[in-house]
Image (spheres, grey):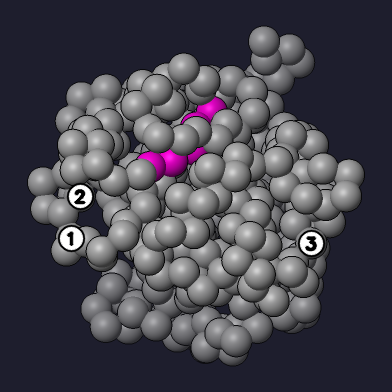
């Protein structure tokens, strides 16, 4: 039921703080230990490389998962688009472990890969929102997102739930392996901080509504730019905007713009710069200057610790690897309002289905 909400997408955006808290409740015990099957953790520990396989928004959640697994837990991790992996698989490591990210648990491209993985006898984990879905049943292990039904075609809360659950899984894995960096990572406290930050952002949605009106009302195209983990967010943010507003939007590694795509920047072209990583903040800002100088209309979404005067959206501070959980909120809202302002049915964008059951 969407209740007082005009659309499910807005309701689901608003639910995200609660989704974070739910995950903490389900997976983190009072004493901070993680409730994840030992068998699953043993299988993960036995792996020499992780392969995350997913499509669309779930693929983008996988990109952030790679950062978490590699930076916190030192395990090499590859992320693959399911439809590519299925017919052009990479050379696998000796002891691979597969993680399927899928809100619906029914995506045909991901199922195709899982069938191959099972045929080869490799262990797998499905992270899904739908218990008893095909990918739940066919994988060796399952972790549920407990995000509640996601009705809007454009995925919002499943994306943040997937990232949060990846963080919880990294915590469990790293504790089992005795990794110092993971010991310092208090996942419950961090996700609680994220939930509070999300709440601040959804409470301020009026600001984003106005930005959408000023910036996106008539444009034909738009860009998101960022580096590293902010580039991961840029890709998801771009998908969100294009799928519900039909504005042609690309997410770019900000340093890559000048290698060709900057030719598309004209007077008034909207460019959203996502800046949360202190290591690359200066660089992304200088890329933003390059497009500003060519007439672009730049929106800065920046974390408080790297924000500058004039940045239109400032994100509450959280641990850098979890910053996508906050940075994506204004981007989801921008997409939502751009779609509404253009008069579209936000929950049912044209040509799209909630779960894609054909390859
Ligand atoms: C975009 C969107 C899709 C899905 C993709 C995978 O908003 O919803 O890109 O993320 O079709 O679906 P699942 O996660 O159900 O496998």
Q: In screen coordinates, is 92 left or right of 282?
A: left
Quadrant housing residue 354: top left
Magenta residues span: 124-129
**CB atoms of marks 2 and 1 within 8 Å:** yes
Task: Examine the rendering and report whether any part of residue 333 can be seen.
Answer: no
Q: Position of residue 186 (x, y in %)?
A: 79, 62
Q: Residue at x 49, y 59 (%)?
A: 45
Q: Nearer the viewer, residue 193 or 342?
A: 193
**CB atoms of marks 2 and 3 within 8 Å:** no
**Element under label 1?**
loop
Task: Examine the rendering and report whether any part of residue 181 can be seen.
Answer: yes
In the picture as drawn, the residue positioned furthest to the right comes out as 30
Residue that numbered label 1 is attached to: 90
**Element under label 3?**
loop
In the picture as drawn, the residue positioned furthest to the left comes out as 87
Instruction: Report the Cα–Cα distance between label 2 and label 1.
Output: 7 Å
Q: Residue at x 31, y 60 (%)?
A: 95
Q: Quick check: 115 above or below 197?
A: above
Residue that numbered label 3 is attached to: 186
Disc 2 vs disc 3: which is toward the camera?
Answer: 3
Q: Is residue 84 magenta?
A: no
Residue that numbered label 2 is attached to: 85
**Who comes first in sequence, dot 1 or dot 3?**
1
Q: Position of residue 183 (x, y in %)?
A: 74, 69
Disc count in the image? Answer: 3
Q: In screen coordinates, is 75 left or right of 301?
A: left
**Who comes first in sequence, dot 2 or dot 1?**
2
Q: Quick check: 357 above or below 68?
A: above
Instruction: Report the Cα–Cα distance between label 1 and label 3.
Output: 34 Å
Ligand 1 near label 1 (Cβ, under 8 Å)? no
């Amino acid at each position: 039921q969407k209740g007082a909400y005009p659309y499910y997408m807005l309701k689901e955006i608003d639910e995200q703080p609660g989704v974070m808290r739910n995950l903490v409740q389900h997976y983190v015990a009072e004493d901070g230990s993680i409730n994840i099957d030992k068998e699953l953790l043993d299988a993960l520990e036995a792996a020499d490389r992780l392969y995350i396989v997913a499509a669309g928004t779930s693929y983008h959640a996988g990109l952030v998962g790679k950062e978490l697994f590699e930076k916190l837990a030192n395990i090499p991790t590859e992320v693959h688009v399911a439809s590519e992996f299925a017919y052009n698989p990479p050379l696998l490591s000796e002891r691979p472990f597969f993680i399927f990210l899928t809100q619906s648990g029914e995506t045909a491209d991901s199922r195709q890969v899982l069938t191959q993985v099972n045929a080869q006898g490799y262990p797998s984990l499905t992270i899904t929102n739908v218990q008893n879905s095909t990918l739940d049943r066919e994988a060796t292990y399952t972790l549920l997102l407990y995000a509640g039904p996601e009705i809007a075609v454009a995925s919002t809360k499943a994306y943040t739930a997937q990232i949060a659950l990846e963080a919880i899984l990294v915590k469990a894995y790293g504790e089992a392996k005795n990794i110092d960096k993971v010991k310092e990572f208090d996942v419950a406290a961090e996700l609680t901080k994220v939930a509070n930050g999300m709440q601040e952002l959804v409470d301020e949605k009026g600001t984003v509504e106005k930005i959408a009106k000023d910036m996106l009302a008539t444009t034909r195209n738009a860009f998101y730019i960022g580096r590293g983990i902010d580039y991961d967010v840029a890709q998801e943010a771009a998908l969100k905007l294009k799928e519900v507003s039909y504005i042609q939007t690309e997410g770019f590694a900000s340093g890559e713009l000048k290698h060709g795509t900057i030719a598309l920047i004209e007077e008034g072209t909207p460019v959203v710069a996502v800046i949360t990583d202190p290591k690359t903040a200066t660089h992304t800002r200088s890329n933003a200057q390059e497009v500003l100088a060519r007439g672009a209309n730049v929106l800065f979404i920046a974390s408080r610790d790297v924000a500058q005067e004039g940045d239109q959206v400032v994100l509450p501070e959280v641990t850098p690897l979890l910053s996508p959980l906050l940075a994506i909120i204004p981007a989801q809202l921008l997409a939502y309002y751009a779609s509404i302002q253009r008069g579209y049915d936000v929950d049912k964008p044209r040509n799209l289905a909630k779960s894609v059951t054909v390859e």
